[in-house]
Amino acid sequence: MSRLAVVCGGSRGIGKAVSCLLAERGCRVAVVSRNKDVAQATVASLHGDEHIGFSCDISKEQEVQKTFETIQKTCGNISYLVNAAGINRDGLLLRTKPEDMVALLHTNLLGSMLTCRAALRSMLHGQGAAIVNIGSVVGLKGNSGQCVYSASKAGLEGFTRSLAKEVASRNIRVNLLAPGFIHTDMTAGMREEALKRSIPLGRFGEPEEVARAVLFLLESPYITGEALVVDGGLQLAM
Ligand code: NDP
């Protein structure tokens, strides 16, 4: 049977591009997001007909547990997990509401911890399972106006490297992919003309360009605990 890939946040943006690429490469894809209709629409657009959409808020432990149990029951053991679900709430720290801090940390950091935890047992049965967590270049470098978002992504990096050590003996690999500015709903309202002047390659990236790097990490049997930056050179200028 073909490999099963679970893509959290797989309905839009970077996660959708990852879902499309994995489906093209012959994986069965479980697309997870809060909005079931959007997840189903993405599933319908994927190559092949063995894919399923799931509605789940990854920041809620019970929903995550139930969803992953259903995935394993209906689709089998998980080979790949991609954590692309994320939110941003940009603003200076003094103006950031505590409820926005909680939402950022619960979705971007706790959410990925919960999905990794829920997927691991199923991954133990697979041959060389792999996880890719989507961090951010601002988690590595920091950015004014993104203190909490950046902290959530820096936390994800530490989590990724630690989990990589924890599960390496079971031949499960865990890596982080840190994008720069990518054309998705998340960046739609940003001042692109001004921002792209700080990017050495002079443009925002496309979700498909990130997806190719995610696939590379998933399929590279000797890479674990690594953070791969896909940012058009942005971090060189930060
Ligand atoms: P989008 O806003 O385009 O897509 C976000 C995806 O996550 C959607 O599928 C959304 O579906 C899902 N999602 C959000 N919250 C939850 C939740 N609580 N539970 C389940 N699913 C959720 O974002 P991007 O594709 O741009 O971002 C993907 C990842 O890449 C994020 O982690 C982001 O932080 C990171 N990133 C993005 C960059 C960019 O420039 N775009 C740069 C650096 C990092 P739904 O709303 O239906 O739940």
Image: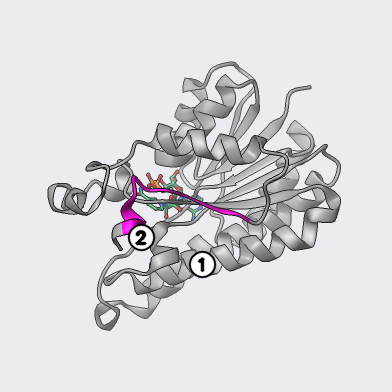
Element under disc 1: helix
Q: Residue at x 45, y 33 (%)?
A: 17
6 is higher (above) or lower (below) than 99: above
Of residues 223 and 57, the one nearer the viewer is 223
Q: Seen from this angle, which residue lies furthest left?
A: 193
Circle 2 residues within 10 Å: few <14, some 14–19, many ≥20 = some
- Left or right placement of residue 159 versus residue 148 in this view: right
Q: Residue at x 58, y 24 (%)?
A: 23
Helix, strand or loop under label 2: loop
At 43% from the left edge and 40% from the top edge, which residue is drawn? 14
Amino acid at pointer 1: His
Real-space Cα separation, disc 2 to disc 1, in angstroms: 12 Å
Horizontally, residue 173 falls left or right of residue 191, namely right
Q: Amino acid at mark 2?
A: Asn
Q: Is residue 117 above or below residue 72?
A: below
Q: How many numbered discs?
A: 2
Residue behind label 2 places its C-beta within 8 angstroms of ligand 1: yes
Q: Within 10 Å of the Cα at label 1, are there few (<14), some (14-19), or many (20+) other Cα atoms?
A: many
Q: What residue range appears in magenta?
A: 226-236
Q: Quadrant of residue 82?
A: top right
Magenta span contains residue 137: no
Q: Position of residue 20 (x, y in %)?
A: 50, 27
Nearest the camera: 137 or 45?
137
Dot 1 beta carbon under 8 Å from ligand 1: yes
- Which residue position is annotated with label 2? 88
Which residue matches tag 1? 106
